[in-house]
Image (cartoon, rainbow, N blue to C red):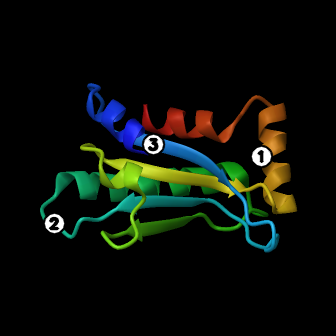
């Protein structure tokens, strides 16, 4: 994670989105997309406000693309106590997206179907934020 933060901070970028698939083998019932953003507690911080808006927009658009049978995407706030390094230590609005759980049959099917149709979640997110 440190390498990604250093690399991102050395670029001329406006935002950062990190994409992941999640897995919890002993809890296959857990499903859905999650968009995590870091809130430093700075009430005037443009980075934090931008990250919250970005996470909310990504989650909303992801929900529309996945359809009615998918769980409602969640937007989760991370604080100093539990923030992922990569979104806490990048100087622009940053979001970490878990696009689904590969250990959940429905999520895995949605993900594989989207790839088969050449509409992967990463492309959806890119098109929403470009």
Label for residue 42?
2
Q: Nearer the viewer, residue 88 or 17?
A: 88
Q: Can you say which quadrant of the picture contains the C terminus?
A: top left
Q: Determine which residue is flagged by label 1.
A: 111
Q: Is residue 74 left or right of residue 80?
A: right
Residue at the (32%, 55%) spot, across then down = 88
Badge 3 local density, few (<14 within 10 Å), some, or many (20+)?
Answer: many
| SS at badge 2 | loop
User: Mark 1 vs mark 3: which is more N-terminal?
Assistant: 3
The picture places residue 41, in percent across and down from the top left corner, at 21, 70
Looking at the image, the residue that sits furthest to the top is 12
The picture places residue 22, in percent across and down from the top left corner, at 67, 57
Residue at the (56%, 50%) spot, across then down = 61
Q: Determine which residue is flagged by label 3.
A: 17
Residue at the (60%, 33%) spot, across then down = 123
The picture places residue 81, in percent across and down from the top left corner, at 35, 73
User: Mark 2 vs mark 3: which is more N-terminal?
Assistant: 3
Looking at the image, the residue that sits furthest to the front is 2
Residue at the (71%, 52%) spot, across then down = 66
Q: Can you say which quadrant of the picture contains the N terminus?
A: top left
Badge 1 local density, few (<14 within 10 Å), some, or many (20+)?
Answer: many
User: Mark 2 vs mark 1: which is more N-terminal?
Assistant: 2
The picture places residue 76, in percent across and down from the top left corner, at 46, 68
- Residue 111 vertical placement versus 24 (above, below): above
| SS at badge 3 | strand
Distance CA(mark 1)–CA(mark 3): 18 Å
Instruction: Confirm or deny contact between disc 1 and disc 3 (CB under 8 A).
Output: no
| SS at badge 1 | helix
Distance CA(mark 2)–CA(mark 1): 36 Å
């Amino acid at each position: 994670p440190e390498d990604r933060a250093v690399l991102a901070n050395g670029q001329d970028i406006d935002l950062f989105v990190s994409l992941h698939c999640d897995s919890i083998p002993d809890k296959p019932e857990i499903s859905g997309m999650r968009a995590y953003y870091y809130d430093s507690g700075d009430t005037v911080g443009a980075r934090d406000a931008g990250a919250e808006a970005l996470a909310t927009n990504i989650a909303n658009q992801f929900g529309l693309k996945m359809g009615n049978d998918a769980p409602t995407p969640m937007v989760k706030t991370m604080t100093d106590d539990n923030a992922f390094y990569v979104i806490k230590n990048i100087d622009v609005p940053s979001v970490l997206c878990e696009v689904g759980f590969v250990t959940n049959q429905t999520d895995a099917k949605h993900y594989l179907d989207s790839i088969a149709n050449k509409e992967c979640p990463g492309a959806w997110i890119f098109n929403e934020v470009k």
